[in-house]
Amino acid sequence: MGHRPFRELTKDFSPERRARIEEGKARIRAEVEREKAERAARESARRDEGPSRPAASARH
């Protein structure tokens, strides 16, 4: 079997199946964007804390 273009593999999908696929893609995109925003917020908070101080147990 040789390579087949993706559009050829999906050409017979029903409109309902295409809609479910699009809904799934939208959910995944939203999750990725939410995770990016959370990561950016954590990094921003970490920068705002300033330099980290050594742990109390490390001091004598």
Image (cartoon, rainbow, N blue to C red):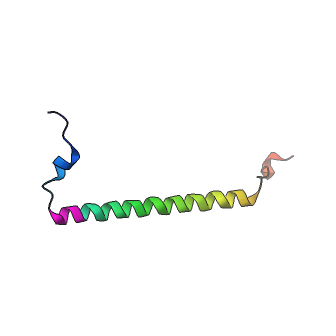
Q: Is residue 39 left or right of residue 5?
A: right
Highlighted range, magenta: 14-19
Residue 10: x %, y % from top left? 18, 52
Compare residues 38 and 17 and report the one nearer the observer. Answer: 17
Residue 9: x %, y % from top left? 17, 48
Verify whether residue 2 appears in magenta.
no
Compare residues 45 and 14 and report the one nearer the observer. Answer: 14
Residue 55: x %, y % from top left? 77, 51
The quadrant holding residue 16 is bottom left
Residue 41: x %, y % from top left? 61, 62
- Placement of the N terminus among the 4 image quadrants: top left
Direction top: furthest residue: 1
Task: Give me the residue at 23% from left, 65% from top.
Answer: 19
Task: Give me the residue at 19% from left, 62% from top.
Answer: 17
- Image vertical order of residue 8 relative to residue 44, above or below: above
Dominant secondary structure of the residues highlighted in magenta in the image: helix
Q: Is residue 39 left or right of residue 4?
A: right
- Image vertical order of residue 24 relative to residue 56, above or below: below
